[in-house]
Amino acid sequence: MDVSLEGIVNWFSASSSESYHFVTSLHGHDGPINTFAFNLGGSLLASGDVMYNAVAYLTYTGDDETVHIWDLKTFRALQILSDRHSRWGQITVLKFISFDGNPNSMSNEWLFIGTGRGHFMAYRRTRRSASHTNNALYANPEGSFSRSFTNLESFSYDSHFGRIAFTSHYGRIKVYHLEKESANLVELWHHELIETIPRAVFFTDRGDSLLVYAMENGTMFDSNSTHRLGYDSETSAEKYVKSLKTAIGNVDVCSSTGHVVVDNMFNGFDLYSPDRTSPIHTFEVESTTGFVKAAVFGEGGRIVGTGSDHGKVYLFDTSRKLCLQVLRHGHRNQNIQTVATKTTKTAHLLVSGASSEKFDIVVWKKVQSPLVSNRRG
């Protein structure tokens, strides 16, 4: 028996019904996995590299300028989306939007794709199949929006008011109204930050507020502080600017609790409460390469899942600063920069994507107790 701390954690995890278990590996990308998205029903996963279906479960992936759509019931790749002229560049953002909020609805489900070259497309699910098609039903893939954004950094959607927000690598923040029938974008307002990169954007307060996390000086390595900027999402009025005592590589905000987790680019991931500018605590994860790594909330905010630069995924208890489980994705030289979580009626799902070596995706699952209510993170 492995008597190291990690070995003990894994032994207890494997012995518990409260643990995540390996399901399968997905192969097909030729570049680093950069982003994931589950659809509302937890049946689809989109992955991008540099949908609920009544019959099938799907997943999307994206960084070889393609988006893969996987069936999470059969674990087959059902579709690969790409630009035949190779103009997309890196897939930076993916998001499923179901306008009627029904996880069983197919007709109103869209997949939105944003890229490093400023393209933004909307693919609508066809009524006759489990796949998505653009069939000219896309939002400004080469129009004014594409030209105004040279590099899409982050993207958020608010279902309460139908607003959509984008940030770019060069400091731009734009908010649009998204027309449901056509997926056309109508600009509401925009801001431009000076010498600051808006790394992540989130709607909060039931869509009334827009939260932006930005780093100073144009590079995450030049500053040890991160700005948290709050705006009125309708009028663009600035509500506040706060400085967090951490650098920022990646960030996630829990929709259930409002807590924030940040890759601090040093010794792990800092957890913040909504009203604090100092971390509640730090989830320590060894790092030697300086690569940006994702951290995401899961199970309604009860856990945080993180990547690493040494082939592992870490799961932490947010209330106790406890490492619950260490999952081995690959070997020690493999960078696991992308993770995502989803809670369905029957299980908690976690996927991890490699940005080096095999560029594979690993699917993990923890079965929910029938007595536990469905919670989303």
Image (spheres, rainbow, N blue to C red):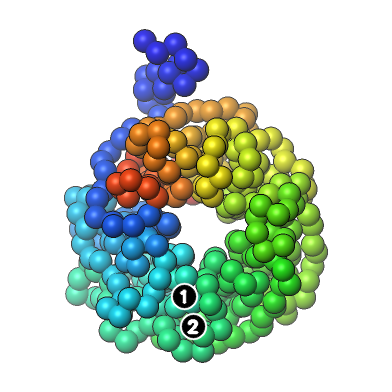
Residue drawn at 37 percent across, 47 percent down:
356
* Percent of width and height locating residue 205: 67, 62
| CA separation in Å, label 1 and label 2 | 8 Å
* Percent of width and height locating residue 252: 58, 52
Would you place residue 126 above or below residue 296 in this image?
below
Residue drawn at 26 percent across, 48 percent down:
26
Residue drawn at 79 percent across, 62 percent down:
241
| Within-10-Å neighbours for mark 2: few <14, some 14–19, many 20+ | many
Q: Which residue is mark 1?
A: 117
Residue type for callout 2: Ser
Would you place residue 260 above or below residue 312 in this image?
below
Q: Name the secondary structure under disc 1.
A: loop
Please say whether residue 335 is visible from this viewpoint.
yes
Q: Which residue is mark 2?
A: 146
Q: Earlier in the sequence, mark 1 or mark 2?
A: 1
* Percent of width and height locating residue 92: 46, 65
For residue 350, the mark is none
- Please indicate whether residue 355 sits to the left or right of residue 176 in the image: left
Would you place residue 333 above or below residue 64 in this image?
above
- Please indicate whether residue 342 sits to the left or right of residue 153 in the image: left
Which quarter of the figure has residue 329? top left
- Please indicate whether residue 221 sits to the left or right of residue 67 in the image: right
Considering depth in this image, is 146 or 122 the residue closer to the camera?
A: 146
Residue type for callout 1: Arg
Please say whether residue 179 is visible from this viewpoint.
no
- Marks 1 and 2 in Cβ contact (< 8 Å): yes
Considering depth in this image, is 209 or 220 the residue closer to the camera?
A: 220
Which quarter of the figure has residue 365? top left
User: Which quadrant is the N terminus positioned in?
Assistant: top left
